[in-house]
């Protein structure tokens, strides 16, 4: 029986001039410190998938992602750590980059498929665990098991707002479930990093309307899109706080938080928790 221990993910108050200026107390949950490669929400999402694979006596994990996918890297590292062979189905034409090289170092086999075929495989994967020799992990590690892992990070907190970045939405759904289970009254603020994803709101209608807000205007041009201003923000924030953010998810989330503070949506004296979901390996795409 594999043993997956609770990761190291402390909560720290951020020493940042903007927060002092507006009198807001901002804390950050350092899920990024959980593991160098099985980092942040990826660690949380993979936990129960790994346990399910073992319970089903599967020895091979198969999953899906883009060429700079943090999830592919996390699965490769977790597979090696817990004794599974791994295969990654990579969206797009064959490429070489630092993320995929790290996946290979952890023993993951890689197969590249075109975008249309990839969409089909991702949909088919949702139905395959009952009739395949491999355990199929959904794209991004989501689904009910992924959300169950995320829910476990929640404690009985006294924050008025809890911020998270939102991609597929599974982290935010898990966070909302955890907040409900812990009877926390704070509002979950989800910063959506995809452009034109407003239809995602339908995925949250079963949660009480007062328990969350989705923000769709902080995507910086779309998923995985970046610009010089965003990269400068990452540099400035890191140099002032000692906390590094990635350009795909967490920098956009913190920029949104800062904007909402400056606009008065978050009031002086309130306490805010920002969930750092890891993803720092994504910065390699800016350096390679």
Image: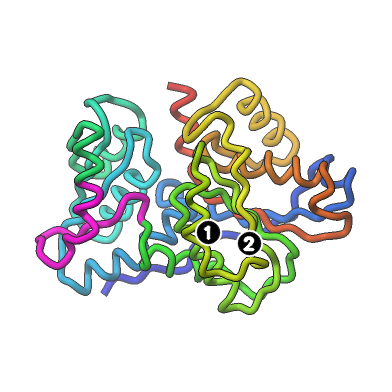
Who's the residue at 10% across and 61% down the image? 132
In the rendered image, residue 111, in percent from the top left (x then y), is placed at: 17, 37
Q: Quadrant of residue 55?
A: bottom left
Give the colouring mode of the picture: rainbow
| Residue 212: image tag | 2
Who's the residue at 82% across and 42% down the image? 262
Q: Nearer the viewer, mark 1 or mark 2?
A: 2
- Looking at this view, is 152 or 195 the one in front? 195
In the rendered image, residue 64, in percent from the top left (x then y), is placed at: 27, 45
> Which quadrant of the figure contains the C terminus?
top left
Vertical arrangement, residue 210 with respect to residue 249, above or below: below
Q: Residues within 10 Å of mark 2 (few under 14, many from 20)?
A: some
Magenta region, residue range: 121-141
Q: Earlier in the sequence, mark 1 or mark 2?
A: 1
Dots 1 and 2: beta carbons under 8 Å? yes
> Which quadrant of the figure contains the N terminus?
bottom left
Who's the residue at 68% across and 63% down the image? 187
Helix, strand or loop for disc 2: strand
Who's the residue at 53% across and 51% down the image? 277
CA gap, disc 1 and disc 2: 9 Å
Q: Is residue 129 magenta?
A: yes
Q: Residues within 10 Å of mark 1 (few under 14, many from 20)?
A: many
Q: Which residue is mark 1?
A: 172
Q: Is residue 180 magenta?
A: no
Helix, strand or loop for disc 1: helix
| Residue 231: image tag | none
In the rendered image, residue 60, in percent from the top left (x then y), is placed at: 16, 57
């Amino acid at each position: 029986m594999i043993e997956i221990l609770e990761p190291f993910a402390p909560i720290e108050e951020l020493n940042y001039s903007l927060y002092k200026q507006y009198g807001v107390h901002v804390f950050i949950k350092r899920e990024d410190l959980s593991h160098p490669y099985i980092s942040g929400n990826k660690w949380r999402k993979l936990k129960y998938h790994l346990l399910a694979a073992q319970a089903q006596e599967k020895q091979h994990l198969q999953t899906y992602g883009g060429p700079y996918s943090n999830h592919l890297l996390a699965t490769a590292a977790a597979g090696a750590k817990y004794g599974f062979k791994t295969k990654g189905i990579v969206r797009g034409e064959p490429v070489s980059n630092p993320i995929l090289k790290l996946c290979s170092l952890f023993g993951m086999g890689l197969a590249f498929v075109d975008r249309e075929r990839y969409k089909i495989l991702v949909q088919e994967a949702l139905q395959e665990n009952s009739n395949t020799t491999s355990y199929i992990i959904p794209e991004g590690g989501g689904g009910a098991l992924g959300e169950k892992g995320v829910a476990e990070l929640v404690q009985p907190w006294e924050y008025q707002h809890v911020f998270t970045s939102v991609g597929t939405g599974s982290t935010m759904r898990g966070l909302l479930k955890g907040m409900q289970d812990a009877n926390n009254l704070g509002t979950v603020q989800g910063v959506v990093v995809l452009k034109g994803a407003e239809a995602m709101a339908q995925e949250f209608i079963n949660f009480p309307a007062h328990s969350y807000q989705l923000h769709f205007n902080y995507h910086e041009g779309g998923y995985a899109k970046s610009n010089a201003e965003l990269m400068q923000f990452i540099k400035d924030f890191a140099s002032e706080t000692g906390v590094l953010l990635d350009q795909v998810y967490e920098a956009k989330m913190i920029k949104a938080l800062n904007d909402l503070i400056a606009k008065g949506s978050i009031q002086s004296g309130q306490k805010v928790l920002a969930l750092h979901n890891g993803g720092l390996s994504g910065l390699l795409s800016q350096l390679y």
